[in-house]
Image (cartoon, rainbow, N blue to C red):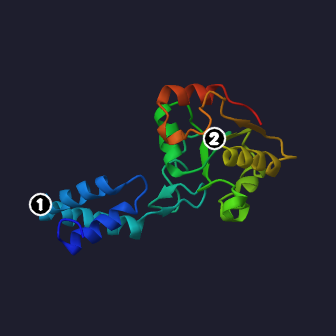
Amino acid sequence: MIFGSPLLTRLVSLFKQMPGVGEKSAQRMALYVLRSERSAIEELARTLNDVKEHVGLCEVCANVSEAPQCVICSDARRSDETVCVVEQPQDIYMLERTGAFRGRYLVLHGVLSPMDGVGPEELRFGNLRQRIEQGGTREVIVATNPTVEGEATALYVSQLLQGLSVRVTRLARGLPVGGSIEFLDEATLGRALEGRQDV
C-alpha cells in the first residue's frame, strides 16, 4: 500500500496504466490530485467524461474528432492532391507543426505486425483505395515510423494502390531507424517531408 491509503494506491495503479507513466510519475500525479483544489479535480473529471462521450474518429480519415469529419477533412483550403498515411493521430499533430504539409490524412491506428496478430483488417486502410479512385489525389505519402513494422506497412500501402495513377512516396530516410515521428523536432520532420522518396 502506498502512503498508507488504499484509495491513493488505487489511483497510482490507474495512472500507471497510462503509456509512459511509471511508478514515480504515477505517485506524483496522485499526490497532485490530493493537493489540488476540488474544483480543478472536478473539472478534470468532467473533461475526461466529455472526451469519452464526445470524441470519436473522423469518418473520412480516422483522425480524432468531435464531429463526423475532423477539422482537417472539413477544411476546404486543404489540398486533395496529397494524402499522408500516418500511424497515430499524434503523428498528424507533429506533421502539422512543421507547416510543410497542406494535404489530407489517413490514420491507420497502428502498423502491420503479424507477430502481434495485427493484419490489414485490424488497421484503418478501409477507404484509402476508394478515396484515390474517386480522383484528385496525385500522391500518397506513407509517413509510418522507420521500423520493420512501419516498412511492412509502407509496402502494403504501395501494393494496395498498385494499378492506380498515383505516386506513392515514403518520408526521406533522414528519420532515425527505430525512432518515432511523435518525438522528432519540426525541422527534421519538415526536411523528411520535403525529401520524401518513391516506395
Residue at 61 percent of width and 57 percent of height: 60
Q: Is residue 143 depicted above or below 51 in this figure?
A: above
Q: What residue sits 72% from the left and 61% below the top? A: 119
Q: Is residue 40 left or right of residue 171?
A: left
* Nearer to us in this view, 191 or 1: 1
Taking the image as drawn, is residue 33 in sight? yes
Instruction: Please tell me which of labels 2 and 1 falls first in the chain.
Output: 1
Which quadrant holds the C terminus? top right
Circles 2, 1 touching at the beta carbon (< 8 Å): no
Task: Name the residue beneath numbered marker 2.
Answer: 143
Amino acid carrying mark 1 in the image = Glu
Q: Position of residue 86 (x, y in %)?
A: 60, 47
Quarter assignment of residue 127: bottom right
> Where residue 67 appears, x then y in whole percent?
47, 61
- Image location (x, y in percent) of residue 162: 85, 47
Q: Nearer the viewer, residue 183 or 126?
A: 183
- Give the amino acid at mark 2: Ala
Q: Is residue 69 left or right of residue 131?
A: left
Q: Residue at x 74, y 38 (%)?
A: 138
- Give the tally of numbered discs: 2
The answer to which image quadrant residue 11 occupies is bottom left
Find residue 50 and report its horizontal and vertical position in percent. 34, 67
Q: Tell me the distance, in whole angstroms, between the alpha carbons under discs 2 and 1.
A: 42 Å
Seen from the viewer's position, the closer of residues 144 and 35 is 35
Of the pair 54 and 12, the residue shown nearer to us: 12
For residue 37, the mark is 1
Q: Residue at x 48, y 64 (%)?
A: 56
Report the quarter where the N terminus lies: bottom left
Residue 81 marker: none
